[in-house]
Amino acid sequence: MKTIVLISCVSKKLAHAARARDIYVSPLFRLNLAYAESLKPDAIYVLSAKYGLLALEDQIEPYELTLNTMGVGQIRAWAGGVVSQLAAVADLKRERFVFLAGDKYRKFLVPHLANFEVPMQGLTIGRQLQFLSRRT
């Protein structure tokens, strides 16, 4: 069974095109990425409100889009696209998925996954930063 970590995108980005691993510059994203890498997973992806599923090396343009301002129908449609992208790179019923992402980014994805965990579920951003700082 492979382990795949999914990190949500953040609003703070570089002002120019860059790899997904570099374009998101908030402390939360940086710590999420460091924590994800410390888990030694088989793969790490970013859940992007604009691009869907991104590999860390994918080159993208900066954007201003978040699931936080989308309606339920839009989020459901976004999640459908991400499920298709995930299914192309992983076995949704056999792999283990670790979410470093808020509820809006995972709500419509988890019903399609047999094995998942959310290590920081229910924690405020401040508590997430503490959790991540202690583990990286």
Image (cartoon, rainbow, N blue to C red):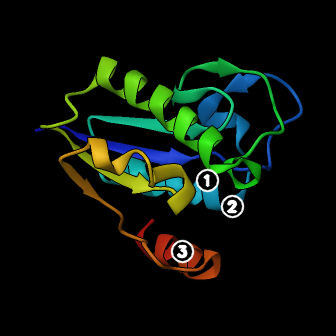
State the separation of the CA atoms marked 3 and 2: 11 Å
Q: Position of residue 72 (x, y in %)?
A: 61, 49
Tag 3's secondary structure? helix
Quarter the N terminus occupies: top left
Which residue is rendered at x = 79% and y = 42% of the image?
13
Tag 1's secondary structure? helix
- Judging by the rendered image, the residue that carries numbered circle 1 is 30
Tell me the mark number nearer the camera, choosing from 1 and 3: 3
* 30 left or right, relative to 113: right
Q: Position of residue 44 (x, y in %)?
A: 40, 37
Image vertical order of residue 83 relative to residue 127, above or below: above
User: In the drawing, what numbered circle is on residue 128?
Assistant: 3
Which residue is rendered at x = 81% and y = 32% of the image?
63
Amino acid under disc 1 = Arg
The crowd level at tag 3 (other Cα within 10 Å; few <14, some 14-19, many 20+) is some
Circle 2/circle 1 CB separation < 8 Å? yes
Sooner in the amino-acid sequence: mark 1 or mark 3: 1
Q: Position of residue 34 (x, y in %)?
A: 49, 53
Circle 3/circle 2 CB separation < 8 Å? no
Q: Position of residue 106 (x, y in %)?
A: 45, 52
User: In the drawing, what numbered circle is on residue 27?
Assistant: 2
Amino acid under disc 2 = Pro
* 84 left or right, relative to 101: left
Image vertical order of residue 108 relative to residue 80, above or below: below
Image vertical order of residue 77 relative to residue 32, above or below: above
Quarter the C terminus occupies: bottom left
